[in-house]
Image (cartoon, helix red, strand yellow):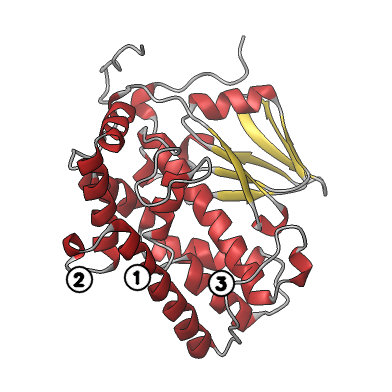
Amino acid sequence: MALFERPPLETLAPARDRWTPIYLEHGRLEVDDSSVKWISATGLLARLPVATISTLILGPGTTITHAAIKACAESNTPICWTGEDSLRFYAFGLTPNHTNDMPRLHAEAWADKRTRTRIGRAMFRLRFPDLDVDSHSIKELRGMEGLRVRSLYAEMGTLHGVTWKGRNYDRQNWDTSDAINRALSAANASLYALCAAVVCSLGYLPSLGFVHDAGTLPFIYDVADLYKHLTSIPAAFLAVRQNPEDEGDLVRKLLKQLVEQERILQRMPKDLAALFQTAEPAPLQAGARPPSAL
């Protein structure tokens, strides 16, 4: 008899109704007594309602059993792996989707040059509502976005009394970065994990971006950039203002508060549906069956 019984599809909460991510480090995830439980290195035991969590973010020193991975997959709960203090976003576990409608829609949009450009411009329109983005190329808009973000960093530095010398960090030696650059990296990595959770839960393709095109997660970076000015950037500057020696706990706490305050989990599915000019994916109704996978 299986310890964790697969929940019926119609009972699974959609991405917009789930809790914000949970970050875990130095401990073990396993299944016992019909639930997924977390056992920390200090002996703390917590049972996790994985079917209602948007994503589990695993930091250093974590192990997870095959049964726990299976339970999360059957609950459509993504798992993401980050580095120490969430300074790096390493990978995510792709969750099963019960239809292939959104992957096909995404792939078709990306493959059509006109549609790809339209969606790219629509993403910039969300950031430049007063600009005629149709009169600019994607390359020009990227340059304008860079200026906008640099101005935002300087503005946040002045607002919070944080010295800002520019976005500068060494992936091989984080200790050489200043506090605000470390905080920005930590906040962004957690935001990427949240975006990966929503993107994968809805069935979009992380590897096909419309503004970014390099690496393995360009669409995740596309989506995250829509919300950084509301979430990760202010969280980082506020964390350094409150505690320059923060090791990541405070910036993640502040990011969580801003994600909830700005209702990012509720907005993201709607924003993505608007970008692709399609209906927002709806949860299965009781008694309905998902289409067969190819």
Q: What is the C-alpha distance between the residues marked 3 and 2?
A: 28 Å
Q: Is residue 16 above or below residue 160?
A: above
Q: Which amino acid does label 1 sit on?
A: Met
Of the pair 278 and 108, the residue shown nearer to us = 108
Q: Residue at x 48, y 51 (%)?
A: 20
Reading the chain from its start, which is encountered first: label 3 or label 2? Answer: 2
Q: In this view, does 140 lie above or below 196?
A: below
Of the pair 186 and 248, the residue shown nearer to us = 186
**What numbered label is drawn on residue 131?**
2
Task: Say which residue label 3 marks.
Answer: 236
Closest to the camera, between mark 1 and mark 2, is 1
Q: What residue type is labelled 3?
A: Ala
Q: Where does the image place residue 111, in percent across and percent down from the top left? A: 29, 33
Of the pair 173 and 249, the residue shown nearer to us = 173
Crowding at dot 1, Cα within 10 Å, few <14 / some 14-19 / many 20+, comes out as: some
**Marks 1 and 2: CB-CB under 8 Å?**
yes
Outermost residue, top side: 1
Task: Say which residue label 1 marks.
Answer: 144
Q: What is the C-alpha distance between the residues marked 1 and 3?
A: 23 Å
Q: Where does the image place residue 193, in percent across and percent down from the top left? A: 53, 48
**Marks 1 and 3: CB-CB under 8 Å?**
no
Crowding at dot 3, Cα within 10 Å, few <14 / some 14-19 / many 20+, comes out as: many
Label 2 SS: loop
Q: In this view, does 142 lie above or below 268?
A: below
Of the pair 147 and 45, the residue shown nearer to us = 147
